[in-house]
Image (spheres, rainbow, N blue to C red):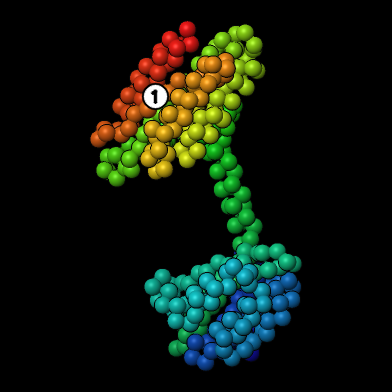
């Protein structure tokens, strides 16, 4: 009785330091006997017995009533007497986070265990704390950060990736080239003809729509490749995998479109492609593709005239 009283005093002192504790278990390793201190009425509604003779068996039985179904398998395989003691031996503590169902909603908690030796006997001190607010704040922060990164990498007009995103993709490829681990790839440069004429004669709103339609065509053609707007009327495509294997077919599709567009006064898009060929980095591949685009642009102008 005196021991329990002292533990309760210690727990109450601990609770003044942090209001996040739901409960603390004291487990006698020699006998398996345990007793529990709860700090919230809500936790007591689970109906878990405050005392028992086999902590691990009782925990496994009780946890199934409150644990989120997606966390059950991981908890059962991790929270064993053997795992817990081995982890404490290695790192001085055992920690596992999981979700319990409160009011029909998942609620994040964290179980932490450590060893206490008193009067020649070993006991486990196991605390369950409420980390729901912290976890959800971190998740919200991660979402906001992801949204900010995406916003910084997306062209506001067309919705495709922007020049910043292209530079990031190039940096990644350059690292792989330096490590000799890059996959085969091709760079295609596409330039939307007559955008200035549309802006001058029909206004910038019409010019924006013209550019959006051109971008849709590029994305439709290069379905499996990232499309980047790298200039006012210029796009770049980095093709790997399926689109790389079909790159000639995709360029032929662009040529067919341009023939029809020249005949029907549609949107003409000059394009040029170059493949990686043991280059030191992406830049020379881009330059070759850019040169091919200007050759194609000149050819289209002569065809149009």
In this view, 42 is above or below 152: below
Q: Position of residue 236 (x, y in %)?
A: 44, 28
Residue visible at 58% across and 52% down?
Answer: 138
Residue visible at 39% across and 24% down?
Answer: 272
Q: Residue 208 occupies which quadrant of the picture?
A: top right
Image quadrant occupied by the N terminus: bottom right
**Looking at this view, is 136 or 244 the one in front?**
244
In this view, 34 is above or below 303: below
In this view, 120 is above or below 286: below
Residue 82 in view in this figure: yes
Q: Residue 57 occupies which quadrant of the picture?
A: bottom right
- Which residue is label 1 attached to? 272
In this view, 174 is above or below 263: below
Say few, some or many: other residues with alpha carbon within 10 Å of mark 1 (under 14 / 14 to 19 / 20 or more). many
Where disc 1 sits, the SS reads strand
Q: Position of residue 213 (x, y in %)?
A: 59, 25
Is 213 placed left or right of 225 in the picture? right
Q: Position of residue 16 (x, y in %)?
A: 65, 66
Residue visible at 25% across and 35% down?
Answer: 278
**Looking at this view, is 305 or 208 the one in front?**
305
């Amino acid at each position: 009785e005196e021991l329990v009283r002292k533990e309760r005093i210690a727990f109450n002192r601990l609770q003044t330091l942090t209001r996040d504790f739901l409960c603390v278990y004291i487990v006698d390793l020699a006998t398996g006997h345990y007793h529990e201190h709860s700090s919230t009425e809500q936790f007591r509604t689970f109906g878990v017995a405050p005392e028992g003779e086999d902590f691990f068996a009782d925990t496994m039985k009780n946890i199934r009533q409150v644990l989120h179904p997606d966390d059950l398998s991981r908890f059962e395989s991790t929270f064993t007497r053997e795992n817990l003691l081995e982890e404490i031996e290695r790192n001085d503590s055992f920690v596992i986070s999981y979700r319990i169902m409160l009011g029909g909603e998942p609620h994040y908690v964290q179980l932490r265990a450590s060893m206490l030796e008193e009067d020649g006997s070993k006991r486990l001190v196991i605390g369950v704390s409420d980390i729901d607010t912290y976890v959800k704040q971190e998740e919200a922060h991660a979402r906001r950060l992801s949204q900010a990164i995406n916003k910084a990498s997306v062209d506001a007009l067309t919705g495709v990736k922007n020049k910043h995103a292209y530079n990031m993709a190039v940096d990644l490829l350059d690292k792989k080239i330096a490590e000799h681990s890059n996959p085969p790839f091709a760079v295609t440069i596409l330039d939307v003809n007559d955008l200035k004429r549309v802006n001058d004669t029909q206004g910038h709103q019409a010019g924006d729509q013209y550019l959006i339609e051109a971008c849709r065509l590029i994305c439709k053609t290069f379905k499996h490749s990232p499309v980047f707007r790298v200039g006012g009327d210029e796009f770049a495509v980095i093709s790997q995998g399926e689109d790389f294997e079909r790159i000639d077919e995709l360029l032929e599709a662009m040529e067919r479109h341009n023939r029809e567009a020249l005949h029907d006064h549609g949107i003409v898009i000059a394009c040029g492609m170059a493949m990686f060929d043991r280059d030191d980095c992406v830049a020379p591949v881009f330059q070759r593709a850019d040169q091919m685009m200007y050759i194609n642009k000149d050819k289209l102008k002569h065809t149009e005239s």
